[in-house]
Image: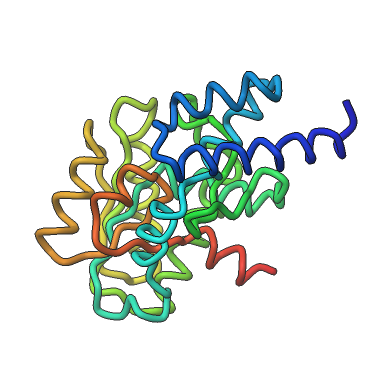
Amino acid sequence: MSSKDIEIRLKNASYDLKFLLNRKYKKRVALNLVANKYLLNKDGRNYLVRKVFSDEKSRDRSHKIVDINNITNKTIFIDGYNVLISVETICNREYGSLIMCDDGVLRDLKAVFGKYKINSTTENALNNIITILSQHNPAYIFFFFDSPVSKSGELAQITKSIIQIHKLNGSAVTNKNVDFELVKLSKKYNGIVATSDGPIIDKVKNVLDIPFWICKTLN
């Protein structure tokens, strides 16, 4: 199948999935119906999961997205692996893996979270994240890395070192339940959460799309 055929198939599948979601079908049920209809493989299903949302869900989430120029004196809670992996993709110029989704969030199609390894792009990506934040003077930045992922402690230490080099107020920790902590602390301190994770976005008040702003800066 040609790339053009795949593109058309995904476009039609996206249309059908949104149609069903707008009529209150559960996403898992609707996704299976559409994926089976268009004979989509794992990559095609992943594309639909990350990109397509109902109009209502898209509106609700997009209203939470904060302009990076409005983070001055705010506390930023960062979903470490979620943001880092996408920024590494940008640093490696693998733009074909990035999609702007219905809810206004830039997402990475790669599914490497649980298998993440510190690599030659890691420090460059962290520098990009911390640099762009430092340019807008947040009160504090707080990275959270999932402790079950191998070498999360080492990654947190690297991140703290880079924060110190940039002379920012901030820290990086590991936690076994990052999603819960991001939601809890952002509410407690009226902070902004940097993530593209949909379930987290649904539970918080304000969201910062760091990969989007880095991509915009580099291009």
Point 31% across, 80% down: residue: 72
- Up-down relation of residue 204 to residue 26 (above or below): below
- Up-down relation of residue 170 to residue 19 (above or below): below
Q: Give the camera-side residue of 107 and 102.
A: 102
Q: On the image, which quarter does residue 215 sit in?
A: bottom right
Point 14% across, 58% down: residue: 187
Residue 51, image x and y in percent? 55, 44
Q: Quadrant of the N terminus?
A: top right
Return the residue found at the far left: 188
Point 71% across, 52% down: residue: 93
Is 1 placed left or right of 118 in the picture?
right
Return the residue found at the far front: 23
Q: Give the camera-side residue of 42 and 58.
A: 58
- State how many labels appear: 0
Q: How is the image coloured?
A: rainbow
Return the residue found at the far right: 2
Q: Quadrant of the C terminus?
A: bottom right
Q: On the image, which quarter does residue 185 sit in?
A: bottom left
Q: Give the camera-side residue of 154 and 30.
A: 30
Is 14 placed left or right of 130 in the picture?
right
Residue 95, image x and y in percent? 70, 51
Q: On the image, which quarter does residue 59 sit in?
A: bottom left
Residue 126, image x and y in percent? 47, 54
Point 41% across, 70% down: residue: 133
Residue 175, image x and y in percent? 22, 36
